Image (cartoon, rainbow, N blue to C red):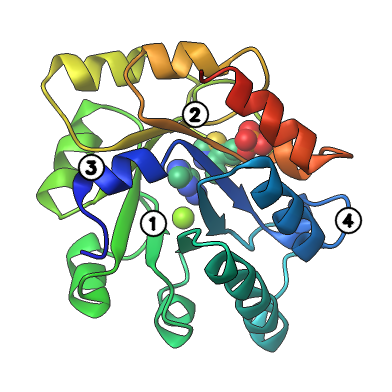
């Protein structure tokens, strides 16, 4: 793996997840400003209404990947295994209904593999399948993802830690200013955020505000 578990745990502190359709303005500008604000990890998640496809999607992925590379920020691709391999991304993030993780692992070698989980059973399964980190959620109500599972809150993370799962974990779903501490205190290593940053008029300030809560 490209990062030790401890390096990965630190890197996952403020995980920006975004696609062009989550942004108020040019996604390259949004990413640049979010990096200036201090995000530590990035996922390209081009999905849902008005998401780019084909060569448009590849072109945007390469531009955002270059910005991450210039700033030493890990670049992860959501779902799209072919894209992740084609542009040599640092890793891939998949959900419960996506490709079989064992098959994905065979294809990606030592790249990072993140898996979305909703409960202890899915978490244990994801670990058995070689996940390097878990995205646990949804933590709170959100409209960013259309097909979210039941909102269970940070208690799920408490349960994973109580069951001695030490794997790096980010909480995701409806995380805004004021909600960060509840996720970190539940035992997450970081938070994954879409709209609180991408929908902001000032992504840099939005990121700084979120980081402020993690001190
Ligand atoms: C991708 C994903 N997975 C669970 S909730 C969610 C959407 C998170 O978006 P936001 O941070 O805007 O609530
Ligand atoms: C659904 C998701 C859960 N967690 C993370 C980190 N990314 C996702 N796309
Ligand atoms: Mg998915």
- Observer-nearest residue: 132 or 10? 10
Q: Is mark 4 within 8 Å of ligand 1?
A: no
- Mark drawn on residue 6: 3
| Spatial separation of the CA atoms under disc 1 and disc 2 | 15 Å
Residue bearing mark 1: 94
Seen at 20% across and 75% down, the residue is 109
- Report helix, strand or loop for mark 4: loop
Q: Is mark 2 within 8 Å of ligand 1?
A: yes
Q: Is mark 1 within 8 Å of ligand 3?
A: yes
Residue bearing mark 4: 25
| Spatial separation of the CA atoms under disc 1 and disc 4 | 26 Å
- Report helix, strand or loop for mark 3: helix
- x and y percent of residue 2 in the render? 26, 65
| Spatial separation of the CA atoms under disc 3 and disc 4 | 34 Å
Task: Please tell me which of labels 2 and 4 falls first in the chain.
Answer: 4
Task: Please tell me which of labels 1 and 3 falls first in the chain.
Answer: 3
Task: Please tell me which of labels 1 and 2 falls first in the chain.
Answer: 1
């Amino acid at each position: 793996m490209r990062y030790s578990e401890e390096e990965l745990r630190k890197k996952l502190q403020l995980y920006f997840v975004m696609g062009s359709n989550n942004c108020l303005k040019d996604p390259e500008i949004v990413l640049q400003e979010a990096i200036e604000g201090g995000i530590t990890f990035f996922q390209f998640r081009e999905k849902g209404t008005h998401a780019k496809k084909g060569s448009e999607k590849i072109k945007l992925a390469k531009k955002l990947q270059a910005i991450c590379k210039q700033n030493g920020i890990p670049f992860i691709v959501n779902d799209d295994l072919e894209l992740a391999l084609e542009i040599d991304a640092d890793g891939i993030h998949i959900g419960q209904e996506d490709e079989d993780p064992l098959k994905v692992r065979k294809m990606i070698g030592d790249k990072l593999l993140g898996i979305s989980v909703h409960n202890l059973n899915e978490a244990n399964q994801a670990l058995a399948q070689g996940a390097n980190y878990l995205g646990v959620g949804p933590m709170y109500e959100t409209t960013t993802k259309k097909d979210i599972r039941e909102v269970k809150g940070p208690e799920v993370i408490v349960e994973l830690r109580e069951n001695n799962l030490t794997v790096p974990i980010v909480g995701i779903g409806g995380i805004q200013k004021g909600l960060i501490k509840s996720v970190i205190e539940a035992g997450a290593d970081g938070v994954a955020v879409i709209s609180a940053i991408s929908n902001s008029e000032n992504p840099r300030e939005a990121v700084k505000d979120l980081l402020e809560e993690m001190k």
